[in-house]
Amino acid sequence: MSSEGQSGRASGGQLEEKVDLSVETQEKLAQARTLVEASASNLREALALLAALEKRCRVGNDTASLVLVCEGSLQLCKDCSDEEALIATLQNLATRRSQKTRAVSALVQKAIPWVLQDSTDGTHKGYEPLDVANDQQKVIREKLVVALRDITDGKIFLEAERARLTRALALIKEQAGDIPGAADVLQEVHVETYGSLSKREKIEFILEQMRLTLAKKDYVRTAIVSGKVNRKAINAEGMEQEKIQYFTLLTEYHKHELDSYELAKDYHQIYQTSTVQANEDKWREALQCTVVFLALSPYSMEQQDMLNRINIDPNLEKINACHNTVQLFLKKEFINNPMPYQAELQSLNAFTSDGDQQLMTHWKDTFRTRIIQHNVRVASLYYRRIHGKRLAQLLGLSTDELEREVANMVSNGDVYAKIDRPADIIRFSQKKTPETVLTDWASDVTSLLDLVESTTHLINKENMMAQ
C-alpha cells in the first residue's frame, strides 16, 4: 500500500485500514512553515494546506501524523501572533467529526502553556494564569481559556486540564474584581466526581470554591460545598495546611450563622493539627478561641463532654484565663458576672471579629446570658422553691430580667420551673403525680428488701465462719 493509500474498511469489512502519511506530513508541515516565514499574510493558505492533510490523517487513522498536523497548525498561528486565528483553528480542529481523542488532548496540551504559568519548576501552581502586559492581551488570554474549557467539557480524559483551566478563569475574573462571576465559574465544576485528580487537588479546589462563595456572601452555597470535603482525607498526614484552611473558612461561615458550638469545634480541630501544636503562639490562640466559644455555647451534653475533654488537656493549665473559665462552667457553683478573666477572653481576635461591632455586641450579650443560665441551673439543683426577689439578689439581676431568663430556659427545656407571681415564688421541683409517688415508693421498698437480704446473708456467713 502506498503512503496515499485508500482509507476506510479493509477487505472483509472487519478492521479499519490505517494509512501511513508520515512522510507527506513532514513535507506539508515544512511547506506551511515556509509560506508563513515568507509572509504572515500567507497564514490562511498554510492553514488550508494543513486542513486538507488533517482530514486525510483523521479518516486514514494515522493518529501520530494527525497529532503533528494539529500541533503544527496551532504553532503557525502562534508564530504569526494571530490570536483570533489561533482560537478559531483550535475550536475547528477539536470539533471535527470523529476527531481522535489523542488529537483533542494534544491540542489542549499544546495551548495550555500559552495561558497558564509553567509549574514544572515548582515556583508556580498549575492553575495560575500567565502574566500579560496590557488589557488587550488579558482579553485574548481569557478568550483562549474559555475556548479550552469548552473543548474539555464532558471529556473524562481531560478532567484534570478542565479543573486547572476553571481555576485559572476564576482567578482572572477575581483579579478583574468580578467575585460573583469567579464563584459561579468555579461552582460549575463538580470536582469531587473527577477520578483523574488526587485527593489533595480535589480538596484544594473545594477550598477555593468555599473561599469564593464566602467572598460572594453566598452562605447557603458555602454550607453545601463544605459538605463535599472528606473529613477522613483532610485529617490524613500531610494535609495539615488544607485542614487549617478548611476549618478557618468554616469559622467565617459559623460566625455569620452565630453558631458558637460549631465555632468551638472548628477551633478545636485547628488546635489539634500537628503543625499548630508545634507552634506555641498558634495553639494558644486556637485553644483560647475554643474555650471562649464553648463558654458561649448553649448547655448540652455535647458541650459538657467537650468541656470535660478540654479540662484534662495539659496545655489548658498554661493559660490561666481558659483554665479558670472551664473550671467555673464545670462546677455546680454560682459564677460572678462579670467573671474573672472575662475581659481578657473578650479581647481575642476571634471574639472581636475584625472590628464588627454588631457581632461583638452579640457575643458579649451571649456571654452574660450563658452565665445567668448556668447560675439558674445551679439554683435549680439546690432549691426546690425560692422567692424570686431572693434569687435575683443572689444572681445580681433585676426581678424582671430573672423572670425573663427563667421563662426562656423553661421554653427551651433547660430547666423545670413554675413562677407564682403573686407570692413571688419560683418552684424548681416538679410536683409528682400519684403514679410517680407509688413508683418511687415501690422502688425504695425493693431497694430496702435487697439491702436486708444482703445483710442477712452476710450475718449468716459470719456465723458459719465463727463456728
Image (cartoon, rainbow, N blue to C red):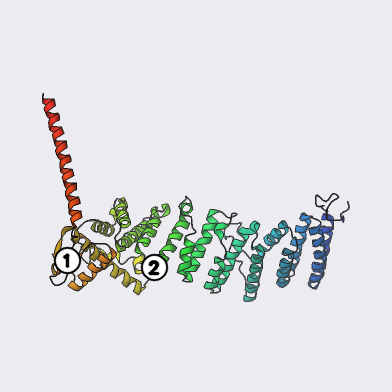
Q: Where is residue 207 in the image (x, y as percent from the top left)?
A: 50, 61
> Which residue type carries mark 1?
Ile
Q: Where is residue 125 in the image (x, y as percent from the top left)?
A: 57, 60
Question: What is the x, y in percent for residue 7?
Answer: 84, 56
Residue drawn where x is 48% and y is 55% of the image? 230
Q: Residue at x 82, y 62 (%)?
A: 53
Q: How far apart are marks 1 and 2 (CA)?
A: 34 Å
Residue 308 x/y as whole percent: 29, 53
Q: In which quarter of the image is the C terminus?
A: top left
The residue drawn where x is 77% and y is 58% is 66
Numbered badge on residue 257: 2
How many marks the image carries: the answer is: 2
Callout 1: SS: strand
Q: Residue 337 carries which label?
A: none
Q: In this view, does 458 lie to the left or right of 51?
A: left
- Who is closer to the viewer here, 86 or 1? 1
Q: Is residue 33 visible?
A: no
Badge 2 marks a residue whose secondary structure is: helix
Locate residue 346 relative to residue 215 in the image: left or right: left
Residue highlighted by disc 1: 426
Q: Which residue lies furthest to the bottom in this view?
A: 135
Q: Going by the image, does 142 lie left or right of 442?
A: right
Q: How crowded is mark 2: few (under 14 residues within 10 Å), some or many (20 or more)?
A: few
